[in-house]
Amino acid sequence: EKRKGGELTDRLRDIKAEDPNAHVFLLQHGMQAGAVGLQEWIDRERGELKSSPVSGVVLLSSFLQRVRFRPGMRACAEKASIQPKCELKHPLGILPDQARRCETENKIDFPLPVLEIGGELDGIVRLTRVAEDA
């Protein structure tokens, strides 16, 4: 059975064999399954990318996944699961002050340089979301 992303890995190996100095940029458009799959492949192949011809990634109307590539966001996601405690006095629930407060640096842990080209006119990829990755 062929592994996920195996064809891309094989093709990159062929390019490297043909021209050891080749530079390849991977292009991703949108946030559908294929685009997310490319980011997952890059994350899985982290160690192998150093010896591959891949020099960077171009994201069109797309952006890096928050939880996967930002260690700080992973820590904040855990706090988001804190649920309010329901009591007779507070039937809708109450949380202690600052229970979900999360301040982290905006550090991105992605193994390749990234160029993001926003698609804010589509109504899905907001300019502020693209700026968040800067």
Image (cartoon, rainbow, N blue to C red):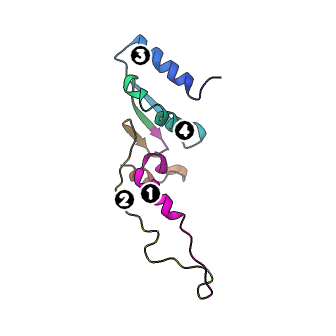
Q: Who is closer to the viewer here, 45 or 24?
A: 45
In the figure, residue 81 lies in which quadrant? bottom right
Give the label, 1 or 4, closer to the camera.
Answer: 1
Residue at the (57%, 77%) spot, across then down: 85
SS label for mark 4? helix
31 vs 85: above or below:
above
Give the label, 3 or 1, closer to the camera.
Answer: 1
SS label for mark 1? helix
The amino acid on which the numbered mark 1 sits, given as a three-letter code, is Ala
Disc 1 to disc 4, how far (Cα)?
A: 24 Å
Residue at the (60%, 40%) spot, across then down: 33
Residue at the (37%, 18%) spot, across then down: 22
Is tag 1's residue or tag 4's residue first in the polypeptide sequence? 4
Which portion, as a residue range, is magenta? 59-88
Disc 3 to disc 1, how far (Cα)?
A: 38 Å
Q: Who is closer to the viewer here, 111 or 28?
A: 111
Do callouts 2 and 1 mark residues in contact (Cβ within 8 Å)? yes
Disc 2 to disc 4, how far (Cα)?
A: 27 Å
Do callouts 4 and 3 mark residues in contact (Cβ within 8 Å)? no
Disc 4 to disc 3, how far (Cα)?
A: 23 Å
Per the rendering, the mark at residue 104 is 2
Residue at the (46%, 68%) spot, across then down: 100
Q: Position of residue 65 (x, y in %)?
A: 49, 47
10 vs 68: above or below:
above
Per the rendering, the mark at residue 35 is 4
Side of 40 relative to 109 (left or right): right
Side of 34 relative to 101 (left or right): right
SS label for mark 3? helix
Is tag 2's residue or tag 1's residue first in the polypeptide sequence? 1
Give the label, 4 or 3, closer to the camera.
Answer: 3
Is tag 3's residue or tag 1's residue first in the polypeptide sequence? 3
Question: Disc 1 designates what residue?
Answer: 75
